[in-house]
């Protein structure tokens, strides 16, 4: 029986993870569930899955959850604060950590799991974007297993040889597929007036609002290029992006002999989640079967750099000193948040990201403290650009 801690259990990935775990009560125990503030949903999850611990970052929400669980006679213990996530990610009883907090806020707990030698199921791509080398080093030192949950990176892992020693000498390149989001064919002039709800209406996936906006700008793919660079040790120039509107081919690996190996499936996150939980075996996920006859055709096209300028920022940041990717991530989190609050326009997200990346002096990054400092400076600078746009 493997004990699983889900950090971000109330989100889209967290809920999908619980759906997969519910199919396999004989193999997995839900040990801990954590979120930020949604105590109502976390209460439902606790009553259904009866974890040993539940944690919320927000103190008032944690107090409400504690009272509600006590009233129901539940034995789940409620912990509060960011430190609870870090503590339970590294707890001796935890075998598997699903890192599904959104944004750089997930870094401390995923790093704690890495240091503690856990099997880390990494949905929180921002951990690798902000702290790629440090994170990979922590995984190596901790001796655990890192399994990507992001659909593209799961596809690449499934398309690579089992023996990592052969990756460098056999692989020619990697291609990340991108849906192109909701505005792939929209008149570029109309992008100016896009609303948050329009940007969050992804054509193929149901996801949280932050990643949905990232898909619409293709900053999601920019973050994923950086993520692939760190996960698979692949130089940026060998990581390509190809638009594939159906989201059926989840990504592919090109080999020196001319073969291209890809992973296909219905667009359903339960598949990569089940893959990560059962690895190296396979188990049922509850995802629907892929019916290629019904789909009929698969399309591919090059991304248009005019329509999706954000994608180029990944390659720019990877060519800059270590820390530039953390700057880009921080700027993007601030810009997306400002867009979702109606403060800036959709098209201004790119502007804030590009200007912040250009402005912030990365300096020398020696460790995590430097990265946190850089993240704070980049957010302040991005906020300056946002305020200038609003004024
Ligand atoms: N959704 C998807 O299909 C995919 C997501 N990912 C990645 O997975 C991660 C999660 O995405 P998604 O599930 O869509 O996001 P959601 O917005 O749906 O969920 C985010 C989760 O994180 C919690 N959370 C947010 N901030 C904090 C914090 N400071 N401390 C503790 N918990 C916090 C939220 O709690 P609360 O509800 O209380 O606010 C919620 O449980 C992201 O990094 C995303 O890029 C990658 C591939 C696909
Ligand atoms: C499901 C998943 O992994 C998302 O990251 C997805 O890739 C988003 O779709 P886009 O291809 O539009 O970014
Ligand atoms: Mn993805």
Image (cartoon, rainbow, N blue to C red):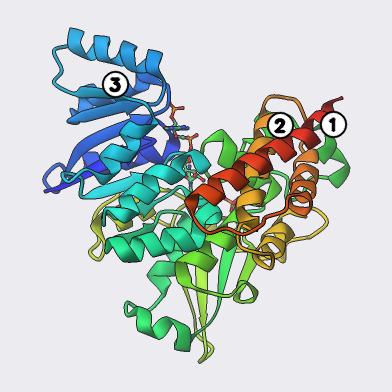
Q: Position of residue 307 (x, y in %)?
A: 80, 53
Q: Please give the residue where the numbered disc 2 appears in the rendered image.
A: 339
- Closer to the camera, 291 or 363? 363
Residue 147 seen by the camera: yes
Q: Which comes sooner in the sequence, label 1 or label 2?
A: 2
What residue is rendered at 85% in x and 31% in y? 388
Tell me the distance, in whole angstroms, between the alpha carbons under discs 1 and 3. Answer: 43 Å
Q: Position of residue 276 (x, y in %)?
A: 31, 56
- Horizontally, is 118 left or right of 365 in the view? left
Q: Position of residue 136 (x, y in %)?
A: 42, 63
Question: Which residue ends up furthest to the bottom in the rendered image?
Answer: 257
- Horizontally, is 201 left or right of 79 in the view? right
- Closer to the camera, 124 or 249? 124
- Horizontally, is 390 left or right of 96 in the view? right
Q: Position of residue 55 (x, y in %)?
A: 31, 27
SS class, disc 3: helix
Q: Please give the residue where the numbered disc 1 appears in the rendered image.
A: 388
Which image quadrant for residue 226? Answer: bottom right
Tell whether label 3 touches label 1 (CB within 8 Å): no
Mark toward the viewer: 1 or 3: 1
Tell whether label 2 touches label 3 (CB within 8 Å): no
Which image quadrant for residue 177? Answer: bottom right
SS class, disc 2: helix
Quadrant position of the C terminus in the picture = top right
Q: Residues within 10 Å of mark 1 (few under 14, many from 20)?
A: few
Which image quadrant for residue 364? Answer: bottom right
């Amino acid at each position: 029986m493997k004990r699983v801690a889900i950090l971000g259990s109330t989100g889209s990935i967290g809920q999908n993870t619980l759906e997969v775990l519910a199919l396999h009560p004989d193999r997995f125990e839900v040990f801990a569930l954590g979120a930020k503030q949604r105590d109502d949903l976390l209460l439902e999850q606790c009553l259904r899955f009866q974890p040993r611990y539940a944690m919320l970052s927000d103190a008032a929400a944690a107090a409400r959850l504690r009272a509600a669980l006590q009233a129901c006679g539940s034995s789940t213990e409620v912990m509060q604060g960011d430190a609870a996530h870090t503590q339970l990610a590294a707890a001796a009883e935890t075998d598997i950590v699903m890192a599904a907090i959104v944004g750089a806020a997930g870094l401390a707990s995923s790093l704690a799991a890495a240091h503690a030698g856990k099997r880390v199921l990494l949905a929180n791509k921002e951990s690798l974007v902000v702290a790629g080398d440090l994170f990979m080093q922590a995984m190596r030192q901790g001796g655990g297993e890192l399994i990507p949950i992001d659909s593209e990176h799961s596809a690449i892992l499934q398309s690579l040889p089992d023996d990592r020693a052969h990756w460098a000498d056999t692989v020619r390149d990697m291609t990340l597929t991108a849906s192109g989001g909701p505005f792939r064919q929209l008149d570029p002039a109309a992008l100016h007036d896009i609303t948050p709800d329009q940007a969050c209406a992804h054509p193929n996936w149901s996801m949280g609002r932050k990643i949905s906006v990232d898909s619409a700008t293709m900053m999601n793919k920019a973050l994923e290029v950086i993520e692939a660079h760190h996960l698979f040790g692949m130089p940026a120039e060998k990581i390509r992006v190809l638009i594939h509107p159906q989201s059926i081919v989840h990504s592919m690996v090109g080999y020196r002999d001319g073969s291209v190996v890809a992973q296909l499936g219905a667009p359903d996150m339960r598949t990569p989640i089940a893959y990560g939980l059962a690895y190296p075996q396979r188990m049922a996920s509850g995802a629907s079967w892929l019916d290629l006859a019904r789909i009929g055709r698969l399309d591919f096209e090059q991304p248009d750099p005019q329509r999706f300028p954000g994608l180029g920022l990944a390659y720019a940041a990877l060519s800059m000193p270590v820390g530039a990717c953390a700057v880009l991530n921080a700027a993007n989190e601030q810009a997306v948040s400002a867009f979702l609050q109606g403060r800036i326009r959709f098209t201004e997200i790119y502007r804030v990201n590009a200007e912040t990346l250009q402005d912030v002096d990365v300096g020398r990054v020696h460790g995590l403290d430097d990265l946190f400092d850089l993240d704070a400076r980049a957010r302040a600078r991005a906020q300056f650009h946002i305020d200038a746009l609003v004024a």
